[in-house]
Amino acid sequence: MTTGSPDYRDSGLEFGPDFLFGTATASYQIEGAATEDGRGPSIWDTFSHTPGKVWNGDTGDVADDHYHRWEADLDLMVELGLEAYRFSIAWPRIQPTGRGPANEAGLAFYERLVDGLIARGIRPIATLYHWDLPQALEDEGGWTNRETAYAFADYARLVGERLGDRIDVWTTLNEPWCSAYLGYGSGAHAPGLMDGAKALAAVHHLNLAHGLAVAALREVVPGDPKFSITLNLHVIRPSGDTGHEAARRIDGLANRVFLGPLLDGEYPADVIDDTRAVTDWSFVKPGDTELINQPIDLLGVNYYSTVTVRMWDGATPRVNADGHKDMGGTAWPGADDVEFLEQPGPYTAMGWNIDPSGLEDLLVALHEAYPNLPLMVTENGAAYDDVVTEGPDGRPVVQDDDRVDYLRRHFTAAHRAIARGVDLRGYQVWSFLDNFEWGYGYSKRFGIVRVDYDTLERLPKASARWYADLIRDRRIPA
């Protein structure tokens, strides 16, 4: 068993020469230029412009203006020593309505971005879908419509034909759990629906989209890139006598409903049984699981916090502290009798508990279940209420010690997982820049680089300098 500080505040731990250090972002959260160069509207444009859906009425219309400032942003990545950059491609920039020929201006933007990364020695990790579905496809049912999966494969093929020779890692989907359950079940994310049956249909069609897209990419992409998907797998702690049954239920909805078809070629029977009252699963057609079960080279893992569950007694007020914004629906179809208990602190500004042991546990569990599948932490980071102060030289600084401590403890967890035999290939910190944090607008700052939303000026925080030291020395700083 790996030893170390019980609070995961280790230092001096070394990472190997091939471990890939980088950061991550998403298109709608940083790009802006929402109506420029032929980009069509996405579900997040519609959602954010709908009163009451996003805090303060914030939208991604301008965001960080990365679309116009990408070169300076890439230069800043070089300054920090980043070895990789995980970005997402906006589907409505490539196909404004989600179908038809590619929009040349959209492809050209990502071509410039990718070439700029390569020229600076930074490896591109491209995510094809980070939630910005073209609104025209949502008008036809979005992810509840089977045809969206086939449209996604066509889109993947267009991007693969243009950029296929330059991408190190192709990621089909980011966190399909969020797209399905928060978008179609709880109402917290675009398109803002609250229907359990639609959420489960979206789960399946997202899984199908992944399989079809991997097959399409393999047809057109030359060389030997890695094909992957990124999941926000939940670390679930049981509580009390009923905790294990509750954990089984939530593990099915959160984790196994994706891992099963993606990696094992079938949906878990207990998940189908648990949700019989919600849907008959008739959206799963013969041959679908074979289409979904495409070989992948890497599994992306996003981790932020844990949940603790037990069965609800039906009498006392039901606790639902699952860490997600409450808009009135449920992200857990068929599990209304499960409650999510308040987690012990401390917490980030998102109200999420800080538990680096959860990351170690998750990585080890995945390795034990799928020992031949390499892993990468594709998102981990923390939102805090950063304060700009004046440094000794009179220049502004952000001394975000809480974020430094958070990252130190989670890199320690990753290192311990490696020491326990996990094939962990890299770590992409969320996020490179402060950005549009979905339903919370610009009120939550995850970046290691601060963005002044009035001037759009970038300011590396203390966490960025700490990370630069880690990358330079390949050792967790003291």
Image (tube, rainbow, N blue to C red):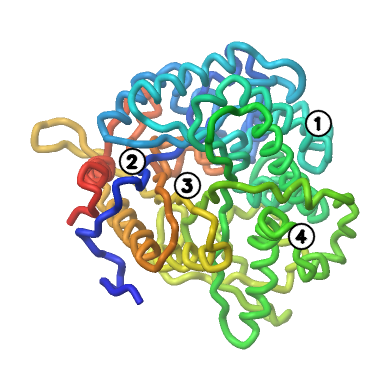
Three-letter amino acid code at the position of disc 2: Ile
Residue 81: image location, x then y, percent: 27, 35
Report the residue marked by disc 2: 448
Q: Sequence order check: which comes first, mark 1 or mark 3?
A: 1
Helix, strand or loop at label 3? It is strand
Confirm whether residue 50 shows in the render. Answer: no
Q: Position of residue 429 (x, y in %)?
A: 39, 45
Which of pointers 2 and 1 lies earlier in the amino acid sequence? 1
Judge by depth and name the residue closer to the eye, 246 or 259: 259
Rounded to the nearest whole Å, what is the CA distance between mark 1 and mark 3?
31 Å
Q: Is residue 101 left or right of residue 63?
A: right
Within 10 angstroms of label 4, few (less than 14), some, or many (20 or more) residues?
some
Neighbor class of circle 2 (other Cα within 10 Å; few <14, some 14-19, many 20+) is many
Q: Are marks 1 and 3 in contact (CB under 8 Å)?
A: no
Front one among 114 and 305: 114
Which part of the image, by quadrant, shows the C terminus?
bottom left
- The tag earlier along the polypeptide, 2 or 4, is 4
Q: Which residue is mark 4?
A: 266
Instruction: Identify the element where label 4 is drawn.
Output: loop
The residue sitting at 65% across, 34% down in the picture is 218
Image-quadrant location for residue 34:
top right
In the drawing, does residue 349 fall left or right of residue 221? left
Residue shown at 47%/66% (left/top)?
364
